[in-house]
Image: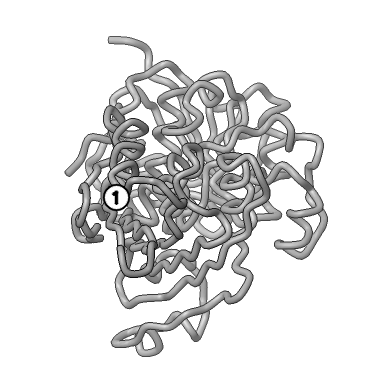
Amino acid sequence: MTERIKCAIVGASGYTGQELLRLLLVHPQVELVAATSRQEAGKPLSAVFPRFRKLPGAELPFMEPDPDAIAATGAQAAFLALPHGVAAEIATALLERGLKVIDLSADFRLSDADVYEEFYGHPHPAPALLDEAVYGLPEIRAGAIREARLVASPGCYPTSILLPLIPLLEASLIDPATIVANSMSGVSGAGKKADVSLLFCECNESVRAYGIPKHRHLSEIEQELSIAAGESVVITFIPHLVPVNSGIATSTTAKLTEGIDPAAIGEALESAYGDAAFVRLLGKGGCADTKNVTRTNFIDIGWAHDARTGRVILTSAEDNLGKGAGSQAVQSFNLIFGLPETAGLQTA
């Protein structure tokens, strides 16, 4: 058997950290050697998360997030499931110690430190690394991810918006100025924190928009759409909180470019993702449903053309903790280490 790759999860006790634990504890090519949590340090993983009892590696104790201690475990790669502003410091320290880093925070998603400060409210903590970081959309940047030592794993909302739109913008099929994206996310997207607005009685039987008109994820969405379009793209993005644990449903509309046959939409998506392991195309008239993607690394994409308005309607669904976070990060890890892209991720 090929020697397994030693991995660390930094910030392993949150929702995304728990998803990474779920995936990496059973990944056939991974040996989990470090899982950090200041709050749970010293406790076995199985004591904090009883669902993992009797899995190989589940008795590993949580440890403090000390870069020297993490490196001393022999870890070759580290997944950072930390808040923005916190991840950059430990990412820098782990890179200096020779680890590959897959960061699930927003700290390295933006190439411009000024844009980061505009959207996140403080100067970038490690601007020297921004040029090196690879934005980790595996379906778009697989080649760059394979060569990377620092991957910035995309946000959950951006993944659901970017994957349907990028092929259409690259082919000039839609007018970038007319893009409007409406997304709905499960409550786990807010992270594991004490917040009155996230209590069961505040969320249950209720749906609300939030973060308007300038949600932080707009920064990376517009950055990546601008690259695809070859021009500056500014969109309207309206996120909503819905009373489910996980899952994101996004509906995006844009004007079809004049003179374009609507069938070109389906052809562009098929050309881009027909062979993609984790993109499932629902075709014309298909409406993506979160129940079909939760606890998986799949994103489902459907489309329609409204002849009355001349607009294209794109629907997508993913798990915000999966394709929008933990499992997409593992997909990038597989690419970095030359493993099959699907390793440890083929779940239905």
Tell me the element at label 1: strand
Residue 261 visible in image: yes
Q: Quadrant of the C terminus?
A: top left
Is residue 189 or residue 277 the one in the foreground? 277
Residue that numbered label 1 is attached to: 301
Quadrant location, the N terminus? top left
**Viewed as shown, does residue 176 lie left or right of 286?**
right
Q: Residue at the location (48% across, 47% down)?
A: 62
Which sits in the foreground, 16 or 127?
127
Front residue of 240/103: it is: 240
Residue under the point 24% across and 42% down = 280
How many discs mark residues in the rendered view? Answer: 1
Q: Nearer the viewer, residue 96 or 197?
A: 197
Residue 198, how many percent across, how many down?
Answer: 45, 80
Is any part of residue 17 visible from this angle? no
Q: Is residue 160 above or below residue 54?
A: below
Residue 60 position, x and y percent, is 40, 40
Residue 267 sits above or below residue 178 on the image: above
| Vertical relation: 313 (above or below) 87 | below
Query: Which amino acid type is marked by label 1?
Result: Ile
